[in-house]
């Protein structure tokens, strides 16, 4: 029989992991590489003439969709393009005065390859949010935002929780 879970203990453990993950992110953002990339990405978004187009697949896609909605609600023209649909006609929505904000923890997501190639071909600037410095997404981004690895709030460290904050 499974051991009963203490809900209060579980909540406190999850909050502790979230706090630890945010602390790691705060340390990384104050470092020279990530702080310069964040500043450059913000400047690019503030000065863009077109729209901010976000994309991802899986949990990164859910985060990208939420970010697109948040940007749009603050007056930044933004929308989400599903990475799997992009190769099937949706790449045509991307214009040369837009900015691509692409999310992939591995930075090697197969479905993102066509969006990355399209951005490069038509000189659409790419901001990449990833967890891997040497990944394709990081290397092809004008501003690679490489996030630190942090423990997930999930007790088995499986469900993407902290990494989606």
Image (cartoon, rainbow, N blue to C red):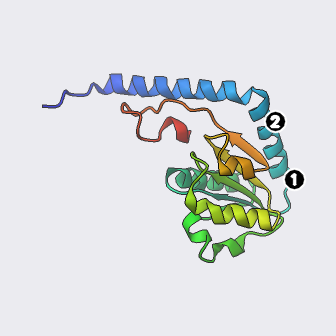
Image location of residue 96, percent across then percent down: 82, 67
Q: Give the image quarter of residue 76.
A: bottom right
Give the CA distance from mark 1 to mark 2. 17 Å
Q: Does label 1 or label 2 sit earlier along the sequence? A: 2
> Which of the pair 43/145 is nearer the observer?
145
Q: Give the image quarter of residue 132.
A: top right
Q: Is the residue marked by circle 1 packed among few (<14), some (14-19), or many (20+) residues within 10 Å?
A: few
State the residue lying farthest toward the left. 1
> Which of the pair 123/93 is nearer the observer?
123
Q: Which residue is mark 1?
A: 47
> Which of the pair 98/126 is nearer the observer?
126
Q: Give the image quarter of residue 30.
A: top right
| Left/right of residue 163 with respect to residue 34 in the rendered view | left
Q: How many marks?
A: 2
**If the image is split into quadrants, where does the C terminus sit?**
top right
Q: Residue at x 64, y 36 (%)?
A: 147
Residue contact at pointers 1 and 2, CB within 8 angstroms: no
| Left/right of residue 76 with respect to residue 112 in the rendered view | right
Q: Which residue is mark 2?
A: 36
Q: Is the residue marked by circle 2 packed among few (<14), some (14-19), or many (20+) residues within 10 Å?
A: some
Nearer the camera: disc 1 or disc 2: 2
Q: Residue at x 49, y 55 (%)?
A: 58
Q: Is residue 68 above or below residue 90?
A: above
SS at circle 2: helix
**If the image is split into quadrants, where does the N terminus sit?**
top left
Image location of residue 153, percent across then percent down: 44, 32
């Amino acid at each position: 029989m499974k051991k009963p879970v203490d809900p209060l203990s579980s909540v406190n453990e999850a909050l502790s992991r979230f706090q630890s993950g945010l602390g790691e992110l705060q340390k990384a953002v104050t470092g020279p590489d990530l702080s310069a990339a964040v500043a450059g990405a913000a400047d690019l978004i503030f000065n863009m003439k077109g729209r901010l187009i976000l994309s991802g697949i899986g949990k990164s896609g859910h985060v990208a969709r939420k970010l697109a909605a948040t940007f749009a609600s603050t007056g930044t023209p933004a929308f989400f393009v599903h990475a799997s649909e992009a190769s099937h006609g949706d790449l045509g929505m991307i214009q040369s005065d837009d900015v691509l904000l692409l999310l992939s923890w591995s930075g090697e997501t197969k479905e993102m390859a066509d969006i990355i190639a399209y951005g490069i071909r038509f000189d659409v600037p790419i901001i990449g949010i990833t967890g891997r410095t040497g990944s394709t997404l990081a290397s092809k981004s004008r501003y690679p935002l490489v996030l630190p690895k942090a423990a997930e709030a999930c007790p088995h460290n499986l469900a993407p929780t902290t990494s989606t904050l």
